[in-house]
Image (tube, rainbow, N blue to C red):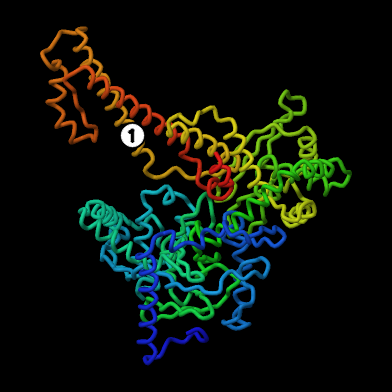
Amino acid sequence: TKETKSKPSNANKAKLANDSNITEKRISKIFQTSTINDILPVNKWWEDPENNIDLDKADDEEESNREDDKESKDSDSESESESQKDQGKGSNDKIFLGGKNEKKFSFLEHNGVLFPPAYQPHGVRIKYRDETIELSPHVEELATFWAQILDNDLSQKEIPRKNFFKEFLFQLKQSIPEYKDKFKQAAFEDFDFSPIYEYVLATRQKNKNKSTEEKQQDKEKKAKLTDIYGLALVDNFAEKLSNYMVEPPGLYRRRGDHPGSGKMKKRILPEDVSINVGPDDPVPICNLPGHNWKTVLNNTYSTWLAMYKEDKSTKYVFLAGNSKFKGKNDLKKYEKARKLKSLITKIREDYFAQMNSKDPERQQLGVATYLIDILALRVGNEKGDDEADTVGCCSLRVEHIQLNPEDSDNVNNVTFDFLGKDSMRYLNTVELDPTVVALMRRFMRGKNKEDDLFDLINAGRLNDYLKSIYSHLSAKVFRTYNASFTLQKQLDSCPLKESDPVDRKVEFYDDANRKVAILCNHQKAVSKGFNAQSITLNQQLKEMLKYLEELKEHLQSFKGKVKKASKKTESAKKNEEEADDEAQKSKLKRVFPDNFEKTSKVIKSLEQKISKLEKKITSRDENKEIALNTSKLNYMDPRITVGW
């Protein structure tokens, strides 16, 4: 199976199955019978005194750059994959992931990837002009995918509707011969998917209503799969995988007006998957009977375990974020950014010198570098017609910039309004250097709104210029530097003391994290259940405040400020009588102690809970469209946090 794509013979099937069982037992046994420190000593690589960081040999692989450069690397990966096939599957030549020839491992053993279960038809039919029609399993699956997003805003957008209906109508006509003429004049509005939508809702509710025992069984099944497929042996040390399940089929749910939104995402089979293992390690058995891996490679210079093509993008299976490979690459990344701190003054002098030259190209290079530095913009690559119209610095158009009149009081205020990565809107009004504003005004003069702001340079030319200043400099390094610098600056201004409560420290740190995320424009769509969760939290707060008011009234009875009761006030008695009914609706436990000291203690505890809940509600609202984890995991040097 290493050398050919043919399926194993019957004589070899028993041996392959036995090898698979040995591998599963070996990995599971290692992980279950040792402590974490025994299993993962390789993760203490930073303590190795021989580990010297040489940035000139830095090898920033796709996994550490995927956050910014995934799309451009996809096309490179495909062409290099074809080159690898020509050279032979057992070759150790450098492929897929760029960088210098540095061997990453000698032994790599894992159990491959898991595939989603085959589609099980449910038999629910849809209607066409009030007529119930029969669907083949494949068409029914496609219709179910659409029904699953009917409660999503995506289903109301023109592009997803158009793309889905084109695929659905084609598959429907192909499924049954007489359908070709029957649906010749069919329109999207002629079809009613509500029967399947109701089935989808019922299935969701059924899953929600599972008993504790059923949920526990599901949890144990998942844990068992994770023990087998969620681990790899790298040079005989266990490492966790970031993911081991290939992408399930469905509809593409792109953000914004992506031209591919609503198209069918095909089902991935083993014949689409390439596996990477050590030269002397066993090949993982394919867990789908009757199928086999596309190819098996022994590429010790790359860190991916499996790879497959999905539409026009390439998906990789890597080790988890706390693995040896990711840790080393992150250290190199942050060291580059840290070195930039000592060079930033020189770099800024250089790009201002470019602006002051008479060469228009050099002027554009200077302004573009300034924007990347000050606003933490991505560099921006050219897009094809089948890609979303997202832009970065070099692909900014005149329509994305709004300048104030030259006689305005805020003449140096510039508004940027464009779609960034993942179709997230970047809207920012900022005061820029007068030289930059004057040059931008000149670049825009005589151009139409759809013309490029920087018409003399592109991303490649800008990167060449950046590397001429500092060999490791890129827009990514600028973003990492500015994110880490901003975090350090915010944490240095902390007014808290070591003795202050932990929740106040967390709140302060999250505020600092938020400022970094805003700088880098790390946004996210508001979650579907956000409003419902907000209503629940506000209801909890309302109940707590009411309970606090009742407790304070109860407390007064011990001070003689209200009509004295023998043990409890009339209000307290009434509240306790209703406590059972309230408990059915709320998780708040209402108690009314029979003395002053206990009541005061309950009031103090409740006030702390109310304060914590109020902060949680405020924080959720402030962060509903901000992705804190993106900057935390990819741009903020973790040593700054650990130091703080």
Residue toward you, 193 or 412: 412
Q: Position of residue 154 (x, y in %)?
A: 44, 50
Q: Residues within 10 Å of mark 1 (few under 14, many from 20)?
A: some
Residue toward you, 459 or 149: 459
Q: Residue at x 36, y 71 (%)?
A: 179
Residue type at mark 1: give it.
Answer: Leu
Farthest residue toward the bottom?
A: 11
Q: Is residue 128 above or below residue 404?
A: below
Residue toward you, 20 or 7: 20
Circle count: 1
Q: Quadrant of residue 461?
A: bottom right
- Does the rendering let one see residue 308? no
Q: Quadrant of residue 220?
A: bottom left
Q: Position of residue 294 (x, y in %)?
A: 49, 78
Q: Quadrant of residue 345?
A: top right
Q: Residue at x 47, y 67 (%)?
A: 237
Farthest residue toward the right?
A: 358
Q: Is residue 451 above or below residue 544?
A: below
Q: Is residue 193 above or below residue 572?
A: below
Q: Secondary structure at mark 1?
A: helix
Q: Position of residue 363 (x, y in %)?
A: 82, 45
Q: On the picture, is 218 further left or further right than 427?
A: left
Q: Quadrant of the C terminus?
A: top right
Residue toward you, 199 or 392: 392
Q: On the picture, is 252 further left or further right than 409?
A: left
- Does the rendering let one see residue 461? yes
Q: Position of residue 460 (x, y in %)?
A: 74, 57
- The residue pinned by badge 1 equals 537
Q: On the picture, is 327 further left or further right than 451?
A: left
Q: On the picture, is 307 further left or further right than 120?
A: right
